[in-house]
């Protein structure tokens, strides 16, 4: 543990992943890991897994928690809640627009009223008080309300007037569209506001639990929450803008990989049990998606890392078929080697029956279940690992697969099966569980597809490594071309270059021009195997297994502000989300005013989000429009002013 007079600052990074919750204590001066630990992620209550991980990391080193000056948390809660349709009941009041018939907005109730502005921030139609009052009354009994006006990013006055009425009448949280993004797109901006409103009660409860958990362990430092764009915000801002935490896990892995590998421009490959995430780092920061984050069916305007995700991980189920083929599926299961260590008697059953696919129940808070689902769950809870046939015979449920699929969707039932992790156990590359269980799984699968166990292991590992290599190439192709070609010839070339298939007449070789940095618990085993296939250096740094937790505490606070200056009838209109449009008669004065306003507001915004030593950068970009049919007949249509503020998180 630190020396008694040690004045260095230590940070505690926490990341809730799909399988494990990681914790790391980091020397904030040296940017090195002091200690690290893991705990199983507890889906029904993430704060339990966080508390266990924190206890583990403190116990590993005998660390005095009072030496922690900063806590950083990266959580999957927002992403998972959106994917699972969870959250508060939210109403929407749309101003000056109506949705297309096929638009999904995610609301419990929605009302659309007159009003709105145009692209210059000028009022198109006035608000009608009676319509406002009636719309607000429709929101009675809901948990939160989103207010989204057409072109409100250029004039927020109508959104604010409706919001004031809601707060006076209903006293529930209100989210305005212009607060979360200055990007155009009424559908995406509205979805962003609605999802943010839905997440408020969930994130508030989670952050309350985290605060209590830290205080109970004597940790009194500021808690920062990781954002999807790779930067930090304090708890107060996270409570207001929880939607900005979506995809924060992949962003944290990018920042952790950069720090641990000491490489600013690289390809981050984060391989875990559930998925493989790939991102590009440019000059120390992950590349941000231009279109905004997509979570399931929802397209938002949230700034997030431009991440390529593949459902390919160490816990992906491997299924051998009688035609000799082997499929590495998208299904996440508990590896046989780990299951045999966890469930008493499972190994003996495997020895006797050569059965290698089982179902198990997971403890979760009660949800609404059908009678059949309850019977399946009760059977698994009482009997432990079982096959669908055993459930069918003992519980008398014919269509058992239907109810199992529903319970799996609710994370109440999971599978046990053969995985890439088991193959590593058989080869001796990685041992955490019972090797014999993995061997039985390999022998049974090899027999199924008429291969020797050794041949089965090597060919399947080759396919898995080729798949990882393929995903890296696909990410590069998407960034270069923005589309993936679909044809048999393209598939042949991709299989050839990654080593999935061999040709006597053609041998292609890849040459990736940036190093690959590996993050995730199994990265040290899998990623060195792709080095020759992709023709680049692979770096798997010390601490890679807790890279996300390191990234969660080792980033900066950053905020942006956008202002636009339009020309109209020899007047210059400054349009911002902070005030009504302002008219100037001199373009240079209008531009200086916009730059000054943007710089002042972004600095305040960053400090409010927990930044210190704030640095502000202001950039301008002229947007041109064609003023005639002749070439070169373009004039400046408007000028965009973007101010970015960055600073270190405040240490308490």
Image (tube, rainbow, N blue to C red):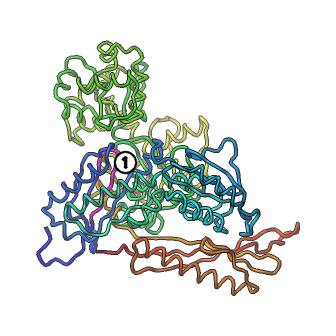
Q: Residue 447: percent from the left, percent from the top?
A: 31, 20
User: 224 left or right of 500?
Assistant: left
Looking at this view, is 414 or 422 the one in front?
A: 414
Q: Residue 624: percent from the left, percent from the top?
A: 75, 71
Residue under label 1, please give it.
Answer: 271
User: 356 left or right of 645?
Assistant: left
Q: Residue 248: percent from the left, percent from the top?
A: 42, 56
First to last magenta residue range:
12-20
Identify the image quadrant of residue 418. Answer: top left
Give the position of the N terminus as an image quadrant: bottom left
Q: Counting other residues with Cα less than 10 Å from the Cα at mark 1, is it few (<14), some (14-19), or many (20 or more)? A: many
User: In the image as oriented, which residue stretches furthest toward the right?
Assistant: 629
Task: Write the residue at 52% across / 74% down.
Answer: 644
Number of numbered tags placed on the structure image: 1
Say if 20 sits above or below 595 in the image. Answer: above
Looking at this view, is 340 or 106 the one in front?
A: 106
Q: Is residue 615 magenta?
A: no
Say if 596 sits above or below 169 in the image. Answer: below
User: 473 left or right of 364?
Assistant: right
Give the position of the C terminus as an image quadrant: bottom left
Kind of element beneath mark 1: strand
Q: Residue 155: percent from the left, percent from the top?
A: 67, 69
Task: Write the residue at 47% across / 59% down.
Answer: 244
Task: Write the residue at 43% across / 19% down.
Answer: 323
Q: Does the magenta stretch include residue 14?
A: yes
Q: Is the magenta stretch mostly helix, strand or loop?
A: strand
């Amino acid at each position: 543990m630190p020396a008694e007079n040690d004045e260095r600052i230590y940070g505690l990074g926490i990341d809730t992943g799909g399988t494990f919750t990681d914790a790391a204590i980091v020397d904030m001066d040296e940017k090195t890991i002091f200690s690290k630990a893991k705990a199983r992620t507890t889906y029904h209550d993430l704060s339990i897994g966080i508390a266990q991980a924190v206890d583990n990391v403190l116990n590993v080193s005998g660390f005095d928690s009072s030496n922690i000056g900063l806590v950083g948390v990266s959580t999957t809660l927002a992403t998972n809640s959106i994917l699972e349709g969870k959250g508060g009941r939210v109403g929407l009041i749309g101003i000056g627009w109506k949705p297309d018939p096929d638009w999904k907005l995610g609301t419990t109730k929605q009302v659309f009223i007159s009003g709105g502005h145009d692209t210059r921030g000028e009022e198109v139609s006035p608000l009608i008080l009676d319509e406002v009052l009636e719309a607000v009354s429709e929101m009675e009994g809901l948990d939160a309300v989103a207010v989204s006006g057409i072109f409100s990013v250029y004039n927020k006055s109508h959104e604010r007037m409706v919001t004031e009425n809601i707060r006076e009448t209903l006293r529930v949280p209100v989210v305005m569209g212009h607060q979360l993004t200055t990007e155009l797109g009424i559908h995406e901006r509205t979805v962003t506001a609605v999802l943010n409103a839905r997440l408020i009660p969930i994130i508030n409860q989670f952050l309350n639990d985290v605060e209590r958990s830290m205080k109970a362990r004597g940790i009194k430092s500021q808690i920062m929450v990781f954002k999807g764009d790779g930067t930090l915000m304090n708890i107060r801002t996270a409570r207001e803008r929880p939607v900005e935490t979506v995809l924060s896990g992949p962003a944290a892995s990018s920042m952790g990989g950069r720090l641990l590998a000491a490489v600013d421009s690289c390809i981050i490959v984060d391989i875990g049990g559930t998925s493989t995430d790939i991102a590009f780092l440019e000059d120390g920061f992950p590349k941000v998606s231009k279109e905004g984050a997509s979570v399931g069916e929802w397209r938002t305007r949230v700034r997030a890392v431009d991440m390529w995700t593949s459902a390919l991980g160490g816990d992906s189920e491997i299924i051998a078929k009688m035609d000799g083929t082997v499929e590495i599926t998208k299904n996440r299961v508990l590896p046989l080697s780990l299951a045999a260590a966890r469930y008493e008697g499972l190994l003996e059953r495997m020895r006797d029956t050569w059965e290698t696919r089982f179902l198990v129940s997971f403890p979760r808070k009660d949800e609404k279940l059908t009678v059949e689902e309850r019977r399946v769950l009760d059977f698994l809870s009482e009997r432990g690992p079982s096959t669908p046939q055993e459930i069918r015979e003992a519980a008398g449920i014919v269509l058992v697969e239907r109810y199992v699929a529903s319970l799996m969707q609710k994370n109440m039932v999971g599978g046990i099966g053969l995985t890439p992790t088991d193959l590593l156990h058989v080869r001796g590359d990685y041992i955490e569980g019972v090797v014999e269980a993995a061997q039985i799984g390999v022998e049974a699968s090899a027999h199924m597809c008429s291969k020797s166990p050794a041949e089965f292991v090597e060919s399947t590992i080759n396919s898995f490594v080729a798949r990882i290599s393929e995903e890296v190439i696909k990410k590069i192709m998407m960034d270069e071309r923005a589309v993936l070609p679909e044809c048999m010839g393209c598939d042949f070339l991709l299989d050839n270059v990654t080593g999935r298939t061999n040709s006597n007449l053609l041998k292609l070789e890849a040459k990736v021009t940036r190093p690959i940095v590996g993050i995730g618990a199994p990265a040290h085993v899998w990623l060195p195997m792709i080095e020759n296939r992709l023709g680049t250096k692979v770096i798997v740094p010390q601490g890679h297994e807790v890279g996300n937790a390191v990234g969660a505490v080792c980033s900066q606070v950053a905020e942006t502000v956008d202002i636009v200056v339009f020309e109209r009838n020899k007047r210059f209109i400054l349009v911002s989300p902070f005030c009504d449009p302002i008219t100037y008669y001199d373009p240079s004065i209008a531009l200086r005013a916009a730059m000054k306003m943007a710089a002042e507001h972004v600095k305040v915004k960053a400090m409010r989000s927990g930044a210190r030593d704030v640095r502000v950068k202001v950039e301008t970009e002229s947007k041109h429009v064609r003023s005639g049919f002749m070439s070169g007949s373009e004039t400046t249509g408007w000028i965009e002013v973007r101010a970015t503020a960055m600073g270190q998180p405040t240490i308490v």
